[in-house]
């Protein structure tokens, strides 16, 4: 690989507290050789022709902590190749994959398969999760230690929740002993039973059963109470309500934990469901505008650490049904950054806050050396035209599944180039 | 009587999916038309030929006696060719999706499809996929527009107006599409609506629909002109909403002593089927001076004829 020179970029690298106009040199072996304002046209070798980025932004490659891939079992929804291409077009260079496949990622032998497929078919960095319990049944723990040794990054039942408090406390004990990261999808099944959307006026109007915010809060409160006794690495996958943010705020002083939020819950609310749009059947559900605003504020106040896409590819057939029968989830990895940037363009959040939640914060929680532009590291990065307007069209999506939650939405800001290990793998 | 509208006014909707979508003109148009069919249904020759050559398909995914037979009869009296699909023998049982069923039926060029489905919004989905008009005969717990319209017609026939009346809707509001459609319609027509139910059977934030809510039946019935009782939908109750039927009857069953809190000339309504001795005292249900339950069924046919005629032509 030839050495690559870029100048005149707005570089934001929250990990290194860098927010400046400057240049970037990628070495022959795909590492960051130099970066920042000291890299400019005056101190580059004169024979080299640097690429002038004309004020475009350079961010570390995004780290998406909640991604569903169809391999194994649901390849028709998404495979590693289609996922990589979709991710790259959205500036995502590292993903944490959920274990809800068929079979479930719950034993050592299947991890070998997964790693091999990831290595052979994927162009981005895959960090697979294994399930907390066998077959995500919520009864027997998986082998955290052995799975970790095989390269499992964290443990979660993905779309499912550990309901049994005794099991949860034992999981926490094991996680503490082995230094494992556990991630909980917080939802009390009994309170959320049959629920499809947020409990409230919209649910009453549409005649759909509701999922009350308390179903989330009660689970978070339970886990954080357990966590007071056992200090393990604990992460709440997604918050969705104002009340949950309040709980987080009151507990941050007492126990150590982290939490995330889906870009869907930051950008949309229950009114967007309109006339039974099944593409907006999400878990956790979209809630009131007050909840959305509280989540944005939570990011601003450093209470929420991570923004995820909650990328859940579903084929058309599982969405062209009545709301009750339709599958839950939306495809979103390729619009994660652009949709997050809406919060910058409308003045809700600072650009650094957003980028931090998409790069250095998830990397820190996962303890991986990604999501930064430190010298000597892999050049995983994206170049972004931050003002470029575009419209989301499901037919233009790269992901194998077209179930976007934001069809026809007008966005501002698009990834123009994405690099993994110094190689340009996406170009608009 | 409903306000006489100009016959030139056309219905604003292609489909009848819910009262929510209708304007006051639409409602008056339907009620006027229905009113004219009441006589037809009472006469010796009940057949009119306005839908001759039209095809009506009844697609009932849930069991139904009165609504299905009412729609079937209405279509036949208007001269349409009516086909009622028997879901238990159909491809639905073989795993066909609603959309595929719709596409199949659509290829047979029906002029109108009447659908009842256990899922809220099923009729909306169907209406997006077929070329003909879709009439909602009840979707999940969302809407049952023809029931509300026939209730309104019954009230108008007896009380000569709806504007200014105080109407109580009592019972299992949570699972009731009838309640929702009636709340929209009766509020639109100027009634004051009281909703009476135990909290466990009250939909969340229902007060935002512009109704008064009561957990105490006697207070909710005070000075009401109409008492509309709803069926306890045991088949939709998956977990403990109530302790027992006898306790429910004690607190929310319509009995003569509770009815005393309503106006002395208050009318009793029920969309049927009734659970006698659970939500309503059996004597009251049959009291010809107070109960208009049979009239509701009778006018149901007229309302459905009106809807079929208006949405089919």
Image: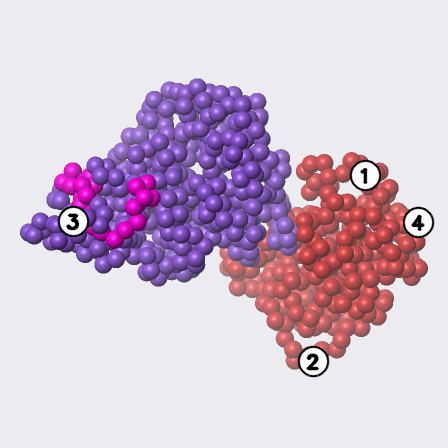
Q: Are marks 1 and 2 on the same chain?
A: yes
Other-residue count near label 1 (Cα within 10 Å), few / some / many at <14 / 14–19 / ≥20: some
* B59 relative to B284 in the view: left or right: left
Q: Nearer the viewer, mark 3 or mark 1?
A: 3
Distance from Cα at disc 3 to Cα at disc 1 = 78 Å
Q: Nearer the viewer, residue B311 or B108?
A: B311
Q: Nearer the viewer, residue B103 or A336?
A: A336
Image quadrant where one finds the C terminus of chain A: bottom left
Distance from Cα at disc 4 to Cα at disc 2 = 45 Å
Other-residue count near label 4 (Cα within 10 Å), few / some / many at <14 / 14–19 / ≥20: few
Q: Are marks 1 and 4 on the same chain?
A: yes
Callout 4: helix, strand or loop? Answer: helix
Residue A134 position (above or below residue B122)? above
For disc 1, the marked residue is B245
The residue under the point 48% across, 25% down is A231
x and y, in percent, of residue A84 in the image: 31, 43
Distance from Cα at disc 1 to Cα at disc 4 = 19 Å
Q: Nearer the viewer, mark 4 or mark 2?
A: 4
User: Which labelled disc corresponds to residue B257?
Assistant: 4
Callout 1: helix, strand or loop? Answer: helix
Q: Are marks 3 and 2 on the same chain?
A: no
Callout 3: helix, strand or loop? Answer: strand
Please state the chain letter of the residue tagged with numbered disc 3 in the rendered image.
A
For the record, the magenta segment spans A14-34
Colour given to chain B in the rendered image: red
Other-residue count near label 2 (Cα within 10 Å), few / some / many at <14 / 14–19 / ≥20: few
Mark 4 or mark 2: name the one nearer the start of the chain: 2
The answer to whether residue A332 shows anywhere in this view is yes
User: Which labelled disc corresponds to residue A5?
Assistant: 3
């Amino acid at each position: 690989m030839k050495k690559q020179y870029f100048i005149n970029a707005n570089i934001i690298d929250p990990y290194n507290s860098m927010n400046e106009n400057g240049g970037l040199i990628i070495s022959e072996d795909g590492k960051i050789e130099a970066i920042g304002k000291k890299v400019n046209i005056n101190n580059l070798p004169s024979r080299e022709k640097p690429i002038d980025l004309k004020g475009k932004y350079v961010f570390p490659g995004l780290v998406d902590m909640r991604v569903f891939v169809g391999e194994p079992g649901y390849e028709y929804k998404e495979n590693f190749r289609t996922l990589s291409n979709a991710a790259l077009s959205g500036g995502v260079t590292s993903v944490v994959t959920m274990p809800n496949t068929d079979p479930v990622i719950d034993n050592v032998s299947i991890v070998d398969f997964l790693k091999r497929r990831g290595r052979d078919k994927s162009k981005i960095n895959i960090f697979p999760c294994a399930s907390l319990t066998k077959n995500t049944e919520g009864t027997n723990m998986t082998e955290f230690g052995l799975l970790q040794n095989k390269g499992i990054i964290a443990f979660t039942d993905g779309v499912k929740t550990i309901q049994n408090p005794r099991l949860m406390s034992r999981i926490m004990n094991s996680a503490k002993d082995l230094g494992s990261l556990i991630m909980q999808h917080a939802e009390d099944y009994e309170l959320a039973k049959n629920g499809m959307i947020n409990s409230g006026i919209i649910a009453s109007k549409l005649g759909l059963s509701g999922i009350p915010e308390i179903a989330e809060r009660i689970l978070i409160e339970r886990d954080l109470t357990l966590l007071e006794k056992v200090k393990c690495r604990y992460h709440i996958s997604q918050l969705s309500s104002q009340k949950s943010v309040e709980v987080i705020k009151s507990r941050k002083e007492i126990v150590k934990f982290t939490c995330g939020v889906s870009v869907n819950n930051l950008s949309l609310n229950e009114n967007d469901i309109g006339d039974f749009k099944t593409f907006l059947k999400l878990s956790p559900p979209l809630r009131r505008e007050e909840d959305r605003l509280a989540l944005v504020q939570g990011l601003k106040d450093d209470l929420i650490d991570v923004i995820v896409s909650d990328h859940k590819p579903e084929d058309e057939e599982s969405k062209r049904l009545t709301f009750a029968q339709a599958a839950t989830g939306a495809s979103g990895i390729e619009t994660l950054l652009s949709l997050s940037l809406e919060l910058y363009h409308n003045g809700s959040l600072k650009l650094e806050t957003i980028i931090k939640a998409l790069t250095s914060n998830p990397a820190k929680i996962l303890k991986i050396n990604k999501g930064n532009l430190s010298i000597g590291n892999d050049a995983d990065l994206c170049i972004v035209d931050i003002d470029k307007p575009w419209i989301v069209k499901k037919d233009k999506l790269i992901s194998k599944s077209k179930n976007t939650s934001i069809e026809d939405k007008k966005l501002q800001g698009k990834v123009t180039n994405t690099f993994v290990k110094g190689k340009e793998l996406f170009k608009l | 009587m409903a306000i006489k509208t100009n016959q030139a006014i056309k219905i604003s909707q292609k489909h009848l999916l819910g009262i929510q979508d209708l304007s006051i003109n639409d409602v008056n148009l339907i009620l006027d038309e229905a009113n004219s069919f009441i006589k037809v249904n009472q006469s010796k020759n009940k057949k009119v030929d306005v839908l001759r050559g039209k095809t009506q398909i009844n697609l009932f995914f849930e069991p139904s006696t009165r609504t299905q037979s009412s729609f079937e009869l209405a279509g036949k009296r208007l001269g349409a060719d009516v086909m009622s699909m028997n879901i238990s023998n159909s491809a639905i049982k073989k795993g066909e999706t609603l959309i595929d069923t719709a596409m199949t039926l659509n290829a047979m060029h029906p002029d109108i499809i009447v659908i009842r489905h256990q899922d809220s919004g099923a009729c909306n989905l169907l209406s997006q996929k077929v070329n003909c008009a879709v009439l909602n005969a009840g979707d999940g717990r969302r809407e049952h527009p023809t029931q509300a319209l026939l209730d309104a017609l019954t009230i108008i026939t007896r009380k000569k107006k709806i504007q200014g009346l105080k109407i109580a809707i009592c019972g299992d509001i949570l699972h009731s599409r009838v309640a929702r459609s009636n709340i929209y319609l009766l509020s639109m027509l100027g009634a004051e609506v009281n909703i009476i139910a135990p909290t466990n059977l009250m939909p969340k934030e229902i007060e935002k629909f512009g109704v008064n809510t009561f957990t105490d039946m006697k207070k909710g019935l005070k000075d009401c002109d109409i008492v509309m009782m709803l069926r306890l939908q045991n088949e939709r109750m998956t977990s403990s909403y109530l302790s027992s039927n006898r306790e429910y009857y004690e607190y929310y069953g319509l009995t003569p002593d509770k009815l005393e809190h309503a106006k002395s000339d208050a009318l009793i309504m029920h969309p049927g089927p009734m659970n006698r001795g659970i939500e309503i005292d059996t004597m009251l249900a049959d009291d010809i001076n107070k109960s208009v339950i049979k009239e509701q069924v009778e006018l149901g046919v007229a309302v459905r004829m009106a809807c079929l005629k208006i949405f089919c032509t």
